[in-house]
Image (cartoon, rainbow, N blue to C red):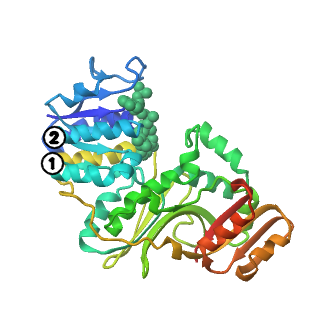
Amino acid sequence: MINIGLLGLGTVGKGVVEILNKRQKELEDLTGRKVRVKKILVKNVDKDRGMDLEEGVITGDFEEILNDKDISIIVEVTSDLEESYTYIKKSLSAGKHVVTANKAVVSKYFEELSQLAADKDLAFLYEASVGGGIPVLKPLKEELALNKGIMIQGILNGTCNYILTRMVNEGKDYEEILKIAQDLGYAEADPTADVEGEDTLRKLRILATLVLQGRITEEDILSYGISSITSWDIENIKNMDSTIKLIGEARLTDEGYIALVHPTIIRNDSQFANVDMVFNSIIFRGENVGELKFYGPGAGKLPTANAVLRDVLDIINDSYWKGNPLGTNKLKNANHTFRSRYYIRISGSDKEVLELFQDALDDIISEEGNIAITTKEVLYKEILDRIQSLGIDRDQYFIARIMD
Ligand SMILES: NC(=O)c1ccc[n+]([C@@H]2O[C@H](COP(=O)([O-])OP(=O)(O)OC[C@H]3O[C@@H](n4cnc5c(N)ncnc54)[C@H](OP(=O)(O)O)[C@@H]3O)[C@@H](O)[C@H]2O)c1
């Protein structure tokens, strides 16, 4: 019997229980053992869970799970950052394997928890933390044994992609689509972490650290979100035979590495253009394998629970990555050298603003009221400095990089 201690019974936790119940026989045939959830930790033990659970499975006491010698695998799918860090650390220290879907905790404590698991000869797996249901981290770890990682790039946040897709398809305003996304459960009541790029940044931190095999923290990544985009920007972008996505990217350059999360204008025939709604996609470039592309559902109850259970299966089958997968490359941040072409819109401005960008101008889309331009290739820092010199609020302008 394989006994799992499940921490959290929300969207993902319920999916884990549902799939385990549905696939009991197949899992027993495959592993030769019964796989069951022995205990479930929740915050509110009195809440009606709307599902059949054995008497006494639910608990509000983590120590009860930690001290249960029969439980060998902890599946951590709570939503808290610091408490889940404590749960994971205590579980590994007590000799239990850990699977988590929590990108915030992996991103913040990646090095420490990876080392702790390696020291204890235990699994610390987090496939569902990046790309929801897409199997991407395990294949990447394998590629990185054979390849030097050169670049990782992706649409990593379903909420932003949903909003941008519907804005492009329907021409509606950002606020209107955000409200629909919230009503449908695709966006949180407080959408800041998604729309300001923080969620994508955490996932990129995890991917970049693995792919470039050195320490890249959240602070090492340039980040700019989508919250100031307007339907007028979308119209301008469509007139460029292009569409827009929030893309996270880390790559090696001659100067070091560049890592950024940014709204990105891509041509309608480019690889990411058809990755729509809540789907995610990730492109990896390795020195031998070339480019690999991953695509699939970026979130959701069953896809995410499925990814969690893939990790559980790897533990049961003893087929998980052994040792610490993080590398020791000394990486140099070269974000100050990042250059690109840009689309810039500044609301309610007059022609004089154009002078600020005179030497960088490529095309003027509009020069009255709402200034919109595209630029030649210039340093990102220069563009930001010039906009900041105007002293305008963040919601008065929008910048997108143009990817050729
Ligand atoms: N939802 C997705 O599609 C998705 C996709 C990828 C990754 N993830 C990650 O998966 C994790 C779970 O997401 P979710 O959507 O399932 O969250 P959720 O629906 O909010 O559920 C969270 C669960 O954790 C419990 N919980 C919260 N804080 C706790 C604490 N301090 N101690 C004990 N239990 C606690 C809650 O208990 P109560 O039920 O009693 O309130 C609830 O059962 C998050 O880290 C999320 O980022 C989610």
Q: Which residue is located at x 54 percent, y 54 percent?
A: 197
- The quadrant the N terminus occupies is top left
Question: Residue 180: x and y, percent?
Answer: 65, 41
Where residue 19 is drawn, which disc sits there? none
Which residue is pictured at 57% across the width and 66% down the height?
A: 273
Mark 2 neighbour density, 10 Å: few (under 14) some (14–19) many (20 or more): some
Specify whether residue 39 is in view. Answer: yes
Q: What's the amino acid at mark 1?
A: Lys
Residue 216: percent from left, percent from top = 39, 63
Classed neighbour count for the residue bearing mark 1: other residues with Cα under 10 Å, few (<14), some (14–19), many (≥20): some
Q: Secondary structure at mark 2?
A: loop
Residues at marks 2 and 1, CA–CA distance in whole angstroms: 7 Å
Q: Residue at x 74, y 58 (%)?
A: 392
Pointer 2 residue: 95
Q: Is residue 50 above or below residue 34?
A: above
Quarter of the rendered structure image containing ligand 1: top left
Residue marked by disc 1: 120
Closer to the camera in the image, 30 or 119 = 119
The answer to the question of whether label 2 and label 1 lie on touching residues, with beta carbons closer than 8 A, is yes
Image coordinates of residue 279 in percent, x first then y, are: 50, 54
Residue drawn at the location 23% of the way across and 24% of the way down: 64
Q: Quadrant of residue 88?
A: top left
- Judged from the image, the secondary structure of the residue bearing numbered disc 1 is loop
Residue 344 location, x and y as percent? 71, 68
The kind of residue tagged 2 is Gly
